[in-house]
Amino acid sequence: MNKKKTVVLGLDGATFKLLKPFAEKGWMPNIARVLKEGVHGELESTMPAMTAPSWTTFATGKHPGKHGIFDFMLPTDSLGNMKFANADDIRDKTVYELLHEAGYTPVLINLPVSYPPKLKDSITITSLLTQGDKWIFPESLKDEFPELEKYRLTPDESLRLKERSEQYIEDLLVHMDEQLAAVKRIFTEKPWDFFFYLFSHTDWVSHLAYTALEENHDESAARVFKKVDEYLGWFMDNIPKDANLVILSDHGFKSYKKIFYFNKWLEKEGYLKTNTNADQFRGAATRRAKESDKIQEGKKRVNLGSGVFTALAKFPPLERAAKWGYHHVVKPYLPVNIKVNVGVDFSKSKVCFPKGSYITNAYINKDWVYKDGTVRRDEYLPLRTEVVEKMRAITDPEGHPVIKRVFTREEVYGDDAPDQAPDIFFELADYWLVGHFHSGNLIADNEENKHGIMGVFMGMGPDFAQQKEVSGLKMQDMTPLLLHLNNLPVPSDCDGTVKQELFATGSDAAQRQPQIGTASRKHAVAKSEKTAISNALHGLKL
């Protein structure tokens, strides 16, 4: 078999709302070149539009209900006992395993949910989801490439925590140079047929400054995108002439002007109870979060109860002054770590978001799944229907919906989702939903730079069309695309399909019909819940 080579470069969190204007301004000339010489289109992320589930869907061609990575953290025997998602939790074979089985040599650098490595005889440098202090496999690579001694998984998180934005951006640029010094050598000196590298920097700087980037084309933060473009140009100059290049993001970005305290709303409605064990609520799911926690451990801890926020909410000027002091004095200068000593009491809660401040879905505390579950099987559907209807009816003081759309698990993942999958999902409007209890009100005017559902796809090379924009691409289409480019069968249980409109007329990929192979599923999905819920849902409109 005549093997083809494929290079996949990830731009985490990238959106055409930034890339196209930056290309037009001359800030990203290599992106401009790809847009002109290749094919591109928006790429719909997963639900939720988060790093871990989306990149796993990229690697499997399946939605999170099948591959099992719903978020950074996954429930075990209790919603209060979450585990960090890792590669062992993926229920399906990945595209790089399928390529490896077919005789291809993959190199994976910074692919989320690649720890621990599935391919023991291949180069894998894992991502910010790494658990432990080893992320370079095999370790002997350090002897071969001394540049790896400076390869950090994350930038200096102390600068972000102290809100020293300019210094943080400078460190992002240094961090990128440190990583690419090693990546470029591996690319040019080691054998590979499939090469993956993810620029996390586009996501990190967007969390910091997306609003300024979109609305004002902030030149300081844009330096990160300019440097990424320079490295894209290096790859384009050094890629083999017969290789295909794919550039994509796992999700987009959006500026949310307000936040809604979702768990607090559940408490108000009687579905959730709190206690004073805040450590149950916040878990360090990523390397970045762990580094942040280490920094906070060196500070004096000050615990606050929910009563402080309730009192402040009665005096808005005082509340605004307290927030200003926290962000402009306490965080940048004082060795103080303020903790809100409020968490979810799982033994008394029916519905919650259990893990940290980012709201991506809601869990019902099912007693046949979790040891401290509080909701019986016969209560499940009526309760879920009630909560969904209430969520759809939430409006702000101006009468605008807080949540754009609400979905059940079957609407998102189908009937075969495992028992531990979330039960309720949402598409956000102008409000970012948070889980912590840092307010006496349900709504606050905090501006948040967070994920949006539409990412980017760009393809350039001998098989891709030129000067073409396509629509309807989804993250689950990426595994079928990569397998088809390499003349390999697509697993029959993939959710994605091969999009023929991506290919140049007369190219090898365009002339071949996609091959359908056997299912790649490695683990049976738990069926205990499926039949009961499916039967109950028959004829029931939610």
Image (spheres, grey):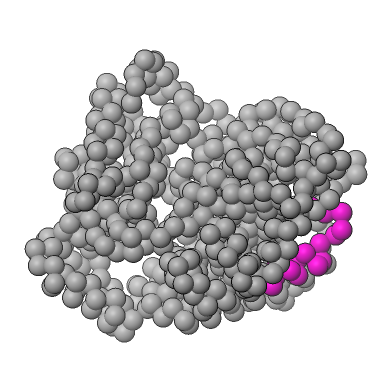
x and y percentages locating residue 392 in the rendered image: 28, 37
Residue drawn at point x = 56 percent, y = 67 percent: 201
Q: Is residue 423 magenta?
A: no
Q: Quadrant of residue 324?
A: bottom left
Residue drawn at point x = 29 percent, y = 34 percent: 388
Please tell me whether residue 298 is drawn above or below residue 486 in the rendered image.
below
Residue sticking out furthest to the bottom: 333
Please tell me whether residue 292 is drawn above or below residue 456 in the rendered image.
below
Q: Quadrant of residue 245?
A: bottom right
Please tell me whether residue 537 is drawn above or below residue 8 in the rendered image.
above
Q: Is residue 69 rendered to the left or right of residue 371?
A: right
Residue drawn at point x = 46 percent, y = 52 percent: 452
Which region of the structure is painted magenta?
230-244
Which SS does the magenta portion mostly show? helix
Q: Is residue 332 rendered to the left or right of residue 59?
A: left
Quadrant including the N terminus = top right
Of residues 146 and 394, the one nearer the viewer is 394
Of residues 110 and 31, the one nearer the viewer is 31
Quadrant including the C terminus = top left
Query: Can residue 60 be seen?
Result: no
Q: Is residue 232 magenta?
A: yes
x and y percentages locating residue 359 in the rendered image: 36, 50
Please tell me whether residue 487 is drawn above or below residue 533 in the rendered image.
below
Residue drawn at point x = 83 percent, y = 34 percent: 512
x and y percentages locating residue 293 in the rendered image: 39, 68
